[in-house]
Image (cartoon, rainbow, N blue to C red):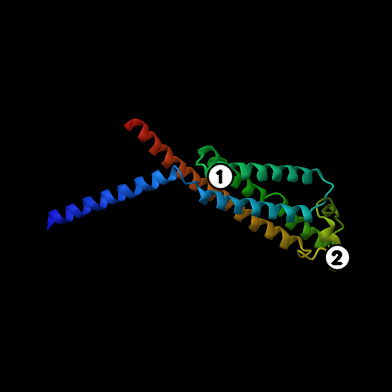
Amino acid sequence: MINEVENNNSLNQMSDLEHDKNELEMMRYRENHLSYNIGIIGIFASLAACFICLNSTNPVTAVVVAKVMMNIVILLGGFLCIEKAKAYSKNASIALMVFGGICVARIFWIPIQLISYFAKYQDFLAGKTTDTTYENYLGKTITTAYSQSTDAYRWLPANGTFRGIFAIVLLLIAAAAFITAGVFGYIRSKKLSTYLDSLKVNE
């Protein structure tokens, strides 16, 4: 009875090893579509957050130029990295995780400013303050549409708090997608690299 159990365990272990070997062998010829697809989600979420922020801020500030340039880097760099991660590149996978960290940092920039300065704008409309510094940050899609209750720019509510929170949610999705794509890509690339190195040793 004990021998049968030991034999079954040995067969199960051999079966698991064979399965892992077959999976690694298939990775040599099959691209890492998981990291690629998750990375695509990150890119589109990041772009959507960018459009909301750019549509809501004052377009004449240097901040907008910096925002545009940063998003161009994330767009082009993100596509390059997910393409390389699809081919099991460790460095590209690490870069995707870095992009995820950048998306987290972006939350504390434009989205937080939108929420903060919209609150000041509401205080100004209510006559609680004469501070008009909000004009340097909020775009007319908010200040015109909100104060006059027009139907302009109705693709999003003319509410800085809503737009800021919406952008934060999108950036969190982008960050989670980039980091997840990077982690999966790194783990898979490391497994494949170790397997290929073992083949060289055995030759």
Q: Tell whether 80 sits left or right of 61.
A: left
Residue 120 in the image: state x and y as whole percent: 79, 58
Give the residue pinned by disc 1. 97
Residue 15 appears in the picture as rendered: yes
Around disc 1, counting alpha carbons within 10 Å, would you say few (fewer than 14), some (14 to 19), or many (20 or more)? many
Q: Residue 99: name its quadrant.
A: top right
Identify the secondary structure beneath mark 2: helix
Identify the secondary structure beneath mark 1: helix
Give the residue pinned by disc 2. 147
Q: Disc 2 or disc 1, which is closer to the eye?
A: 1
The residue that appears at 56% across and 44% down in the rendered structure is: 97
The residue that appears at 79% across and 64% down in the rendered structure is: 158
- Quadrant placement of the C terminus: top left
Q: Tell whether 189 sits left or right of 52.
A: left
Residue 126 appears in the picture as rendered: no
Question: Looking at numbered disc 2 in the image, what kind of residue is underneath it?
Answer: Ser
The residue that appears at 81% across and 60% down in the rendered structure is: 142
Residue 145 in the image: state x and y as whole percent: 84, 64
- The number of discs equals 2
Residue 198 to residue 176: above or below: above
Mark linked to residue 162: none
Distance of label 2 from label 1 (alpha carbons): 41 Å
